[in-house]
Structure formats: C-alpha cells, structure tokens
Image (spheres, rainbow, N blue to C red):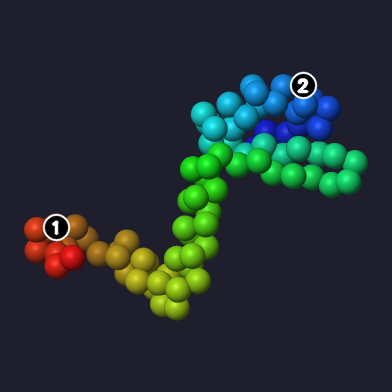
C-alpha cells in the first residue's frame, strides 16, 4: 500500500491515481480528520464481488469444493447447460 498525506496527494494527484490504477496498489491518504483509501476500479469491483459471493449461504463451501476438484473430474464446457 502506498501512503500519502493530503498535501502531497493534492500536489501529485494525477501521478498517485495513475499508479494506483496501473499497479492496483491501494493508496492511503492521511488527513487531520482521519484516513481515506483509494482503490483502482478493478480492485473495488473484485472486493465487491468477493463480498457478494461470501454472503451467499453455502457459496464458500462450493468454491472450496471446486478448488479441490481435479480438472480431470470436471465436465467440458460443451457439456454445460447454460
């Protein structure tokens, strides 16, 4: 995670935001009233999707089972009924 105070953030906003987007590294900005975190859109979307998936009852277990299943035990994409 990158760190910046609000003064440095104001001076270098374009560079800091570009680095956050390019490298997907969160940026913590400290102010006298507290801190804020800036995330890339990709990181934000991933975080929201993870929160959603873990909120679905039983989804964590399904994902764990899927990760433990070998590829040879899976059906091909052509056999999946969408």
Residue 3 appears left or right of 79: right
Q: Are marks 1 and 2 in contact (CB under 8 Å)?
A: no
Quadrant location of residue 4? top right
Residue extending furthest toward the bottom: 57
What residue does disc 1 label? Answer: 77
Residue extending furthest toward the right: 32
**Residue at 72%, 22% in the rendered image:** 12
Q: CA distance from mark 1 to mark 2?
A: 51 Å
Q: Identify the element where label 1 is drawn.
A: helix
Tally of numbered discs: 2
Give percent across and percent down for residue 73.
15, 64
**Which quadrant holds the N terminus?**
top right
**Residue at 41%, 77% in the rendered image:** 58
Q: Nearer the viewer, residue 29 or 70?
A: 29
Crowding at mark 2 (Cα within 10 Å: few <14, some 14-19, many 20+): few
Residue extending furthest toward the left: 78
What residue does disc 2 label? Answer: 11
**Residue at 74%, 44% in the rendered image:** 36
Q: Identify the element where label 2 is drawn.
A: helix
Crowding at mark 1 (Cα within 10 Å: few <14, some 14-19, many 20+): few
Quadrant location of residue 76? bottom left
Residue 10 appears left or right of 66: right
Quadrant location of residue 10? top right
Task: Answer yes or no: is residue 73 visible.
Answer: no
């Amino acid at each position: 995670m990158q760190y910046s105070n609000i003064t440095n953030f104001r001076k270098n906003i374009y560079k800091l935001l570009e680095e956050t987007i390019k490298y997907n590294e969160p940026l913590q900005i400290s102010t006298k009233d507290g801190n804020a975190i800036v995330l890339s859109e990709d990181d934000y979307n991933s975080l929201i999707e993870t929160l959603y998936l873990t909120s679905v009852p039983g989804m964590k277990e399904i994902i764990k089972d899927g990760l433990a299943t070998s590829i040879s035990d899976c059906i091909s994409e052509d056999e999946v009924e969408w």
